Image: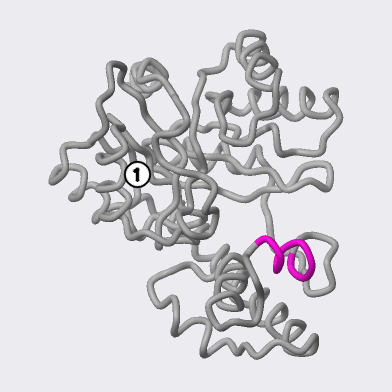
């Protein structure tokens, strides 16, 4: 473990339960080695890794926070909402996650067909067999093409073939951010607007969305994030103050899927988690 005089955390990470490259156990072990005091597992549309994650936290002495990340849409922009302290056994949450997965699988087949028509050697059987315990999605397609020597890196595949607007991209099923907030609340969790720096929304539209989300119970905003540009954190902290929202922060660590993001590099203070836990009681 790295020497560390302050307690730092990460409230936005992914494992093989969705599109990360580390198992929940490996994720916690890496967090300990990076000097993190606490970590949240927020897999996309999946809570399958939460039991292993909790056990690993007890084993390695790292505080673990159960979570999930939901994909939504607002003003034609994909918006992500993180749930923290969600109950992984909540029936309503599990039912909605199944809908997400079923729709994702159908989308995967359409995108694989387009990739094959473009000239890539990829089949659904090969893709799912390579990542048997994951919620297979676009990052897995990109990793497959890289690992089989058909593309130089994951970014190349996204930028040229499977990102929004690219020739092999297919739209996916989404709910609204407000519906995500309500679902997270039903699962006993707190809702956090994830990485607002990534959204291509005019400021006025962002504020309108936050207003609508707050009206149905939005709890916080991810003010500290690995992709923030200068001035972003200050802006999001101001929004949090204006709307009475909690502050959160996370790296969006995926392991090999986002190799430039490392656990422990982003200094999110433990005080964020203390206030989140106070609100959750």
Q: Is residue 8 above or below residue 62?
A: above
Residue found 50% across the figure and 28% down from its top: 249
- Residue 205 rendering spot, x and y as whole percentages: 83, 29
Q: How many numbered marks, from 0 up?
A: 1
- Residue 232 rendering spot, x and y as whole percentages: 69, 22
Magenta stretch: dominant secondary structure: helix
Give left or right: position of 65 versus 190. Answer: left
Q: Is residue 159 above or below residue 209?
A: below
Give left or right: position of 249 versus 172. Answer: left
Q: Does residue 52 show up magenta in the picture?
A: no
What span is in magenta? Answer: 155-162
The residue positioned farthest toward the left in the image shown: 59
> Dot 1 corresponds to which residue?
87
Q: Is residue 197 above or below residue 119?
A: above
- Residue 177 rendering spot, x and y as whole percentages: 66, 40
Residue found 42% across the figure and 19% down from its top: 272
Give left or right: position of 32 versus 156. Answer: left
Residue found 41% across the figure and 40% down from its top: 263
Q: Quadrant of the N terminus?
A: top left
- Residue 12 rendering spot, x and y as whole percentages: 47, 40
State which quadrant residue 111 falls in: bottom right
Residue found 48% across the figure and 53% down from its top: 254
Depth check, front residue: 26 or 97: 26
């Amino acid at each position: 473990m790295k020497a560390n005089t302050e307690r730092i955390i990460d409230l936005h990470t992914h494992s093989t339960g969705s599109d990360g490259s580390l198992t929940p156990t490996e994720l916690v072990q890496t967090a300990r080695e990076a000097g993190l005091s606490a970590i949240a597992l927020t897999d996309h549309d999946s809570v399958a890794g939460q039991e292993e994650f909790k056990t690993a936290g007890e084993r390695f002495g790292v505080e673990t926070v159960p979570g999930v990340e939901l994909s939504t849409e607002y003003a034609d922009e994909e918006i992500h909402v993180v749930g923290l302290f969600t109950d992984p056994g909540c029936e309503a949450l599990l039912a909605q996650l199944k809908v997400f997965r079923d729709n994702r699988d159908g989308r995967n087949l359409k995108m694989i067909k387009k990739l094959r028509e473009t000239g890539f050697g990829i089949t659904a059987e090969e893709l799912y067999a390579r990542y048997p315990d994951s919620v297979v999605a676009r990052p897995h397609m990109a990793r497959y093409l890289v690992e089989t020597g058909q593309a130089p890196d994951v970014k190349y595949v996204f930028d040229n073939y499977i990102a929004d607007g690219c020739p092999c991209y297919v739209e996916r099923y989404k709910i609204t951010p407000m519906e995500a907030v309500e679902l997270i609340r039903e699962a006993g969790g707190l809702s956090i607007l994830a990485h607002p720096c990534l959204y291509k929304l005019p400021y006025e539209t962002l504020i309108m969305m936050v207003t609508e989300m707050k009206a149905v119970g939005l709890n916080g905003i991810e003010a500290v994030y690995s992709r923030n540009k200068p001035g972003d954190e200050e802006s999001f902290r101001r929004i949090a103050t204006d709307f009475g929202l909690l502050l959160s922060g996370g790296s969006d660590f995926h392991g090999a899927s986002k190799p430039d993001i490392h656990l422990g590099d982003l200094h999110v203070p433990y005080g964020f988690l203390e206030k989140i836990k106070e609100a959750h009681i």
